[in-house]
Amino acid sequence: MQLTNRSKHVSNKEMTLAERMYLPAIAQGLAITIKHFFQKKPTIQYPEVKRYLGPVFRGHHVLKRDEEGRERCTACGLCAVACPAEAISMVAAERRKGEEELYREEKYAAVYEINMLRCIFCGLCEEACPKQAIYLRHDRFVPVFTERDDVIYGKDKLVEQLDDRYIRTNTDVKATPTEPTLSRAAT
């Protein structure tokens, strides 16, 4: 009776003298080693050369500003509701007179925090935002944490600087020799 169709038939034939001395196996192993010796090295020298992350990589969070430099976030809370890890918390406030150049809408996020230990980088906050205020950058890693106080990202670390604007739509992405060929444009 046969229980599986993956069984192998084993023969008990006598090995030759070369097979008993493992000469064919040693020659085959040396051939593989020599073949790999002359191939291009896949190692990337990390601190100097950074690996291409791809257009769909989800990394560092950023709270976007509009063209006039005002914050886009209206503290609607949809990103916090969509977050499966419950990593986002915010406190809403009303815009006062004279703050029109800081905030786009009547309501804004006075406190916006992301607990990076809880975040699973799923991108659901980005999809839930009706104002396109939060993005996960595809070109930057989240820095390494050295202290427990560094894991809560507030508005000071999240709101984008005007001199370092993040542009999500990049149709000029081209593959370099160290990165794979892209089958679709970055979105």
Image (cartoon, rainbow, N blue to C red):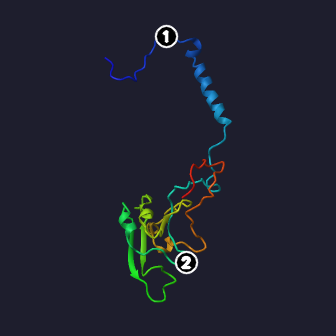
Q: Quadrant of residue 27?
A: top right
The crowd level at tag 1 (other Cα within 10 Å; few <14, some 14-19, many 20+) is: few
Residue situated in front as seen by the camera: 13 or 168: 168
| Residue in front for this viewpoint, 2 or 152 | 2
The residue tagged with tag 2: helix, strand or loop? loop
Q: Which mark is residue 13?
A: 1
| Image point (63%, 58%), residue name | 172
96 lies above or below 183: below
Q: Position of residue 62 (x, y in %)?
A: 50, 68
Farthest-out residue, left: 1
Three-letter code for the amino acid on which mark 2 is drawn: Gly
Secondary element type, mark 1: loop
Image location of residue 113, percent across then percent down: 42, 71
The residue under the point 48% across, 79% down is 104
- Which kind of residue does numbered mark 1 sit on? Lys
Neighbour class for label 2 at 10 Å: few (<14), some, many (≥20)?
Answer: some
Q: Position of residue 110 (x, y in %)?
A: 42, 79
Q: Nearer the viewer, mark 2 or mark 1?
A: 2
Q: Which residue is mark 2?
A: 69
Q: Residue at x 66, y 35 (%)?
A: 37
